[in-house]
C-alpha cells in the first residue's frame, strides 16, 4: 500500500511540475508582449532550462535515488542470504527502511528455523559423529600410514604418519586432501593393483585386497596393502569407488635383511664347499688299505656328520626363502588371468605381436602364488631385450602344469639362440624397461617366488624360450568364498570426493564447485615489481571440494637480497632481522610451485601478486600456467553498487574475522573465506563455470589496472 502511495506521489509531482512549467511559460509569453522578440525568446529559453533542471532534480530525488537505495539494499539481502546469521540491514529512505525492516524480520525467522533444523540434525547425527570420532582417533593412533583415495587417485583422508613419512619426500608429490597419490607412488604399479582387484571382484572372491612392495623417489621401501572401497552395501551390486592404502616403511628392515642374506649366502655356500672337500677326502680315505675297522668307523662318523650338515644347510636355505617370501607378499591368482594380463601388458609396450597358447582343458584351473607386477616387469624386460638386441619379431606366452608342485611359464620366440653368458648377464643386470629403471634383477624376482629360471632351445621347432618354474598354488574353492562372503565394512564417513571423477575437459568448462583452489598472498618490499621490489613472504591455503583446509597451508619468509624500506615495515611487520638467514626466492618458489600444482590460483588484486611471479620466471625457470581468479574483480561482479571492494570491506561485509592482517598467510586465509562466500553468490547469478567467472571478471572496471 505504501509503495502505491509513493508511486502516485511521484506521478502527481511530475504532473504538477509540468503544469507549472506550462502555466509559467504561458504567463510569461502573454505578459511580455511589449518586449522585443529576441528578448522574449531568451526569456522563454531560460524558463525551459530552469524547468528542465527542476525536473531532473525532482527525478533524481524521487526516482533515481530510491532506485540506487533499493539496489544497495538488494546486495545486502544477497549477502545476508549466504550467511548463517543475517547482519543488520541499513537504508536511508523511509520506503527502503520499511522494506529493510520486513526483510530483517524474515531473516530473523529464517535464522530461527535454521537453528531448529540444525538442532534436529545435530541430535540425529550425534551417534554417527561419535563413530566418526572413534574412527578418526583409531586412524590417528595407527602405527601404519593410512591413505584413502578415490578412483582418480585423489587423496580423501590421511593420518599424521602418512604426512610425516611421505610428506618428507620433496622429490615428488605432496600429501594433502585432493592431491594425487600418483605423485607419491608409481602409477603403473597402482593401476596394476587396481586391475587385480577388479578381476577378483568380478570373479566374486571374498577377499579382493592385494599387496605389493614399492620403491619411492625419496629412497624408501614401502610395503603396501590396497583394499577396495565399494560404492554400495549390497554385495551383489557393489562397485569399486576407491581404495584404502596401508603403508609400512620397511627400508630399515630391508637393509638388515640384505645384510642377513649376505651372511646367509656366505654361510651356505661356504658350508657347501666344505662338504664337497670332506666328500673328496672321504673317497680318498676309502681307497686306502689297512686298518679296515678304524677306517670303517671313521667313514661312518664322517658320513653321519655330512648328512647332518647337509640337512641343516637345506633347512637354513628353506627358512631364508620363507623369509624372502614374507618380505615380498605374494598373492593367489588364476594362471589364465595372469597370462591375459601379461599379454596385454607386453602388447602395449613392445613393437611386436604377443600371442598366448590356449590352456589345456585337461589340466583344469592353474593357480599361482606370485607378485604379478614384478613378474610382469621381468617378462617385459626380457622381451624388450630380445626385440632390441636380437630383432625378434614375435613372442609367445604359455603356461602349463608339470609333475610335482611346479608350473612352467615360458616366454617363447623363434630365431636366434644365445649363449649361457648372455643369459646370466640378463638375469643379473638390474631391469631397465623404456625410460624406467628398477633396482630388481630377474634373479631377485625369481628368488622372490621361490622359483627357478633357465634358457632352453627346441631344435625341432626352431624355437627358444625362457622358462620360469613357479610353485603351484592349491586350487582355490571359489564357491565356498562366494557362498560365505565377508560382510562389508560399516560406512563411517561420507566422503564427498568419492563422487568426483577427473575429466579431460578444459579448465574453463569445469564447474566452479568441482575445482581445487590455492588461495595465496605475498608481502613485498614495495609496490613496484618492475622497479626492483622483491617478495618478502608467501602464504597460501587450499580449498578442496568447497572446504577450506586450514591444516594444509604454506607460510614462508623470503630473504629479498636487498634493503627493506622503513616505510613498509609498519604495514607488513617484516624486519631485516626476520628475513636474515631465510632462503632466497629461488629456493622457495619450487616448493610453492609444487604446493599450488593442479589447482586454480586465487588472490585479492591478483594482478599485483602474479606480476612478481611472472618476473621470476627467467630467474627460476618456473611458470604458473594455471588459471587465476581475483576476488577484487569478482566482488565488483557480485556487488557492483558497493563503494569499496578492499579486502577489509569484503571481510566486514561477509562477517569474516580478520586475524593476521598484512601477513601473507593471514591475508590468504581471509581471501579464502571471501572466495567461498563469492562462490555461492556467483552461482546464484547463473555463473557456474570457471570460464564464465573469468569472462565476467574481465568486464569490470578494475580489470583495466596494470602493474
Image (cartoon, rainbow, N blue to C red):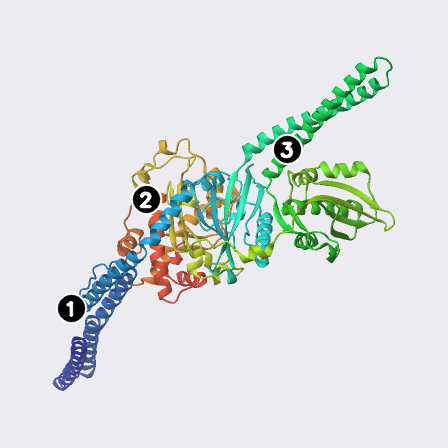
**Furthest-top residue in this view:** 291
- Distance between mark 1 and mark 3 Cα atoms: 92 Å
Is residue 107 visible in this depiction of the protein? yes
Write down the quadrant of residue 329 in the picture. Answer: top right
Is residue 539 visible in this depiction of the protein? no
Q: Which residue does the image show at 60% across and 52% down from the upper left?
A: 196
Q: Which residue does the image show at 67% across and 45% down from the upper left?
A: 375
In depth, the one of 45 and 312 nearer the eye is 312
The local secondary structure at tag 3 comes to helix
Find out whether the residues at labels 2 and 3 contact each other: C-beta distance under 8 Å: no
Find out whether the residues at labels 1 and 3 contact each other: C-beta distance under 8 Å: no
- Circle nearer the N terminus (1, 2): 1
Q: Position of residue 443 (x, y in %)?
A: 70, 38
Q: Is residue 75 left or right of residue 293?
A: left
The local secondary structure at tag 2 comes to loop
Q: Name the disc covering residue 662, or none.
A: 2
Q: Position of residue 492 (x, y in %)?
A: 40, 53
Q: Nearer the viewer, mark 2 or mark 3?
A: 3
Query: Which residue in the protein does label 3 denote?
Result: 320
Q: Position of residue 144 (x, y in %)?
A: 47, 40
Q: Name the disc covering residue 590, or none.
A: none
Amino acid at each position: 500500500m505504501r509503495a502505491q502511495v509513493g508511486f502516485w506521489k511521484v506521478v502527481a509531482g511530475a504532473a504538477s511540475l509540468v503544469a507549472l512549467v506550462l502555466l509559467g511559460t504561458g504567463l510569461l509569453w502573454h505578459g511580455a508582449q511589449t518586449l522585443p522578440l529576441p528578448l522574449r525568446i531568451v526569456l522563454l529559453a531560460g524558463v525551459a532550462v530552469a524547468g528542465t533542471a527542476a525536473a531532473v532534480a525532482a527525478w533524481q530525488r524521487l526516482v533515481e535515488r530510491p532506485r540506487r537505495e533499493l539496489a544497495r539494499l538488494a546486495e545486502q539481502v544477497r549477502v545476508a542470504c549466504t550467511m548463517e546469521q543475517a547482519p543488520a540491514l541499513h537504508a536511508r529512505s523511509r520506503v527502503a527502511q520499511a522494506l529493510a525492516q520486513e526483510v530483517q524480520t524474515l531473516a530473523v525467522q529464517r535464522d530461527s528455523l535454521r537453528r531448529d533444523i540444525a538442532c534436529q540434525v545435530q541430535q540425529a547425527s550425534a551417534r554417527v559423529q561419535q563413530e566418526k570420532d572413534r574412527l578418526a582417533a583409531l586412524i590417528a593412533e595407527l602405527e601404519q600410514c593410512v591413505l584413502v583415495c578415490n578412483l582418480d587417485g585423489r587423496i580423501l583422508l590421511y593420518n599424521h604418519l602418512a604426512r610425516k613419512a611421505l610428506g618428507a619426500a620433496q622429490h615428488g608429490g605432496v600429501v594433502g586432501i585432493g592431491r594425487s597419490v600418483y605423485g607419491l607412488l608409481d602409477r603403473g604399479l597402482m593401476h596394476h593393483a587396481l586391475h587385480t582387484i577388479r578381476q577378483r571382484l568380478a570373479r566374486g572372491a571374498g577377499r579382493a585386497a592385494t599387496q605389493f612392495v614399492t620403491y619411492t623417489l625419496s629412497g624408501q621401501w614401502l610395503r603396501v596393502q590396497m583394499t577396495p572401497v565399494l560404492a554400495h552395501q549390497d554385495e551383489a551390486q557393489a562397485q569399486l569407488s576407491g581404495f584404502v592404502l596401508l603403508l609400512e616403511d620397511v627400508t630399515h628392515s630391508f637393509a638388515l635383511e640384505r645384510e642377513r642374506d649376505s651372511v646367509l649366502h656366505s654361510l651356505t655356500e661356504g658350508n657347501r664347499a666344505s662338504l664337497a672337500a670332506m666328500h673328496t677326502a672321504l673317497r680318498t680315505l676309502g681307497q686306502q688299505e689297512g686298518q679296515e675297522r678304524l677306517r670303517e668307523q671313521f667313514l661312518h662318523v664322517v658320513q653321519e656328520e655330512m648328512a647332518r650338515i647337509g640337512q641343516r644347510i637345506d633347512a637354513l636355505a628353506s627358512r631364508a626363502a620363507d623369509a624372502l617370501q614374507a618380505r615380498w607378499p605374494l598373492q593367489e591368482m588364476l594362471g589364465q588371468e595372469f597370462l591375459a594380463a601379461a599379454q596385454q601388458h607386453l602388447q602395449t609396450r613392445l613393437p611386436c605381436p604377443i600371442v598366448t597358447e590356449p590352456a589345456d582343458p585337461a589340466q583344469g584351473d592353474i593357480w599361482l602364488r606370485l607378485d604379478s607386477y614384478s613378474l610382469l616387469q621381468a617378462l617385459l624386460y626380457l622381451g624388450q631385450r630380445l626385440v632390441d638386441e636380437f630383432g625378434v619379431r614375435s613372442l609367445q606366452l604359455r603356461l602349463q602344469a608339470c609333475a610335482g608342485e611346479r608350473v612352467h611359464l615360458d616366454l617363447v620366440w623363434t630365431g636366434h639362440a644365445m649363449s649361457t653368458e648372455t643369459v646370466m648377464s640378463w638375469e643379473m643386470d638390474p631391469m631397465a624397461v623404456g625410460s624406467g629403471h628398477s633396482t630388481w634383477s630377474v634373479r631377485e624376482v625369481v628368488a622372490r617366488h621361490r622359483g627357478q629360471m633357465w634358457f632352453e632351445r627346441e631344435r625341432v621347432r626352431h624355437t627358444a624360450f625362457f622358462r620360469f618354474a613357479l610353485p603351484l598354488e592349491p586350487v582355490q574353492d571359489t564357491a565356498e568364498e562366494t557362498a560365505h562372503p565377508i560382510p562389508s565394512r560399516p560406512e563411517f564417513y561420507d566422503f564427498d570426493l568419492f563422487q568426483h571423477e577427473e575429466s579431460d575437459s578444459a579448465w574453463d568448462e569445469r564447474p566452479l564447485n568441482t575445482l581445487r583452489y590455492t588461495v595465496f598472498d605475498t608481502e613485498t618490499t614495495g609496490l613496484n615489481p618492475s622497479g626492483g621490489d622483491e617478495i618478502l613472504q608467501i602464504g597460501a591455503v587450499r580449498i578442496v571440494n568447497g572446504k577450506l583446509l586450514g591444516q594444509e597451508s604454506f607460510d614462508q619468509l623470503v630473504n629479498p637480497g636487498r634493503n627493506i624500506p622503513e616505510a613498509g615495515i609498519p604495514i607488513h611487520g617484516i624486519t631485516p632481522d626476520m628475513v636474515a638467514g631465510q632462503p632466497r626466492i629461488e629456493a622457495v618458489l619450487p616448493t610453492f610451485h609444487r604446493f599450488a600444482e593442479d589447482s586454480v590460483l586465487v588472490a585479492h588484486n591478483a594482478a599485483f601478486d602474479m606480476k612478481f611471479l611472472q618476473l621470476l620466471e627467467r630467474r627460476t625457470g618456473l611458470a604458473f600456467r594455471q588459471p587465476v581468479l581475483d576476488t577484487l574483480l569478482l566482488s565488483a561482479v557480485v556487488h557492483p553498487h558497493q563503494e569499496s571492494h578492499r579486502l577489509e570491506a569484503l571481510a566486514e561485509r561477509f562477517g569474516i574475522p580478520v586475524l593476521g592482517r598484512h601477513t601473507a598467510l593471514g591475508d590468504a586465509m581471509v581471501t579464502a573465506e571471501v572466495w567461498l562466500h563469492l562462490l555461492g553468490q556467483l552461482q546464484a547469478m547463473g555463473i557456474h563455470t570457471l570460464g564464465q567467472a573469468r569472462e565476467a571478471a574481465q568486464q569490470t572496471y578494475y580489470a583495466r589496472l596494470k602493474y
